[in-house]
Image: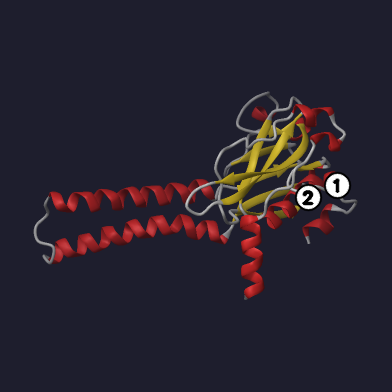
Amino acid sequence: MFEKLKQQLRMLTAVPAPFDPARFGDPLALQTQWTPAKRGGANFRTHKRAMEGPSRFEFRASIGARLFYLLFFFAGLGVFVALAVSLLSGTAGSFNMGHLIPLLLSQIFIALGAYMFYAGTAPIVFEKGRGVFWKGRKGPDEEVVNRSGGNFVRLDQVHAVQLIAEYISGKNSYYSYELNLILEDGKRIPVVDHGNLDGIRDDAKALALFLGKPLWDATIQSPSSSEIPSTSVSKQSE
C-alpha cells in the first residue's frame, strides 16, 4: 500500500530532466516547439492505449476519467432529484426564487457531466488501413481522406512522436505529460495529456513502434529513449 502511494507521489512531483533537442539528430527537432501545444492537463491517467490489431491503435478513456465525468453528472442529478422530491412532497414549501439557484446549478452540472463524458470518452484512433489518425466516434470517409485538410491527420504526414511535461501550478501543483504528433512541416497535433508519467511514456513508446517513427521524449535525459525498440507490434501490445 505504501509503495503504491510512494509511486503515485513520485509521478505527481517528478521534475522533468533538462534536455537538448539536438540529441535526436534531426534538424526538425531543433525547429519544433518544446512548450505545451495545449495548456492544462490532469493529475491522473485519463487515457490508456487499446491495441485492436496490427493495423489499428486506440487510446480510450480510463476508468478514473469516466468516473470523474460521471461525478459531475450524478452530483447535479442528485441535487435536482432531491429538490424535486422536496417540492412535490411539500417539505420545501412552494416553489420560489430561493429554489431557482440550486435548480439551475443542478442543470449545469448535469449538462457539463454529460458533455464531458461524451467528449472525454470519444476514441482516439490510428488506423493503418486508411492511413489516418482522428479523434471521435466516427472516422473520415474515403473521399475526405483522399483530400487534404479536415479533422484528421494522414499517417504519412507524421514525422515523430513527442513527449513533453507541463507544470500545472495551483493549490495542488503537479506535472501533466503531453503526447503530440510532429508532422513533416513541424506542426504539432496533441493526442493525450495526463499526469501518469510511467503510463504515458509506455504508451508513447508503443505508439512510436506502431507508427514506425522516432520518439522524442523530453521527460528523460537519456538519448536512448528516442530510439524505437526492435520488437514487433504484437509483442508490444501484449
* CA separation in Å, label 2 and label 1: 7 Å
Q: Please state which of residues 161 and 217 is positioned toward the viewer in this rendering.
A: 217
Marks 2,1: beta carbons within 8 A: yes
Which quarter of the figure has residue 93?
A: bottom left
Image label count: 2
The colouring scheme, among rainbow, by chain, secondary structure or one colour, is secondary structure
- Where is residue 104? Give x, y as percent: 26, 48
Q: Is residue 204 left or right of residue 141?
A: right
Identify the residue shown where x is 75% and y is 35%.
Answer: 155
Quadrant housing the C terminus: bottom right
- Where is residue 167? Give x, y as percent: 60, 45
Which quarter of the figure has residue 11?
A: bottom right
Name the residue type under label 1. Ile
- At mark 1, the secondary structure is loop
- Where is residue 175? Give x, y as percent: 61, 50
Identify the residue shown where x is 74% and y is 24%.
Answer: 185
Q: Is residue 54 left or right of residue 86?
A: right
> Which residue in the protein does label 2 denote?
205
- At mark 2, the secondary structure is helix
**Which mark, by number, is residue 228?**
1
- Where is residue 13? Give x, y as percent: 63, 56
Tell which residue pokes out farthest to the right in this image: 230
**Which mark, by number, is residue 94?**
none
Position of residue 58 relative to residue 81, above or below, is above
Q: Please state which of residues 165 and 66 is positioned toward the viewer in this rendering.
A: 165
Position of residue 87 relative to residue 139, above or below, is below
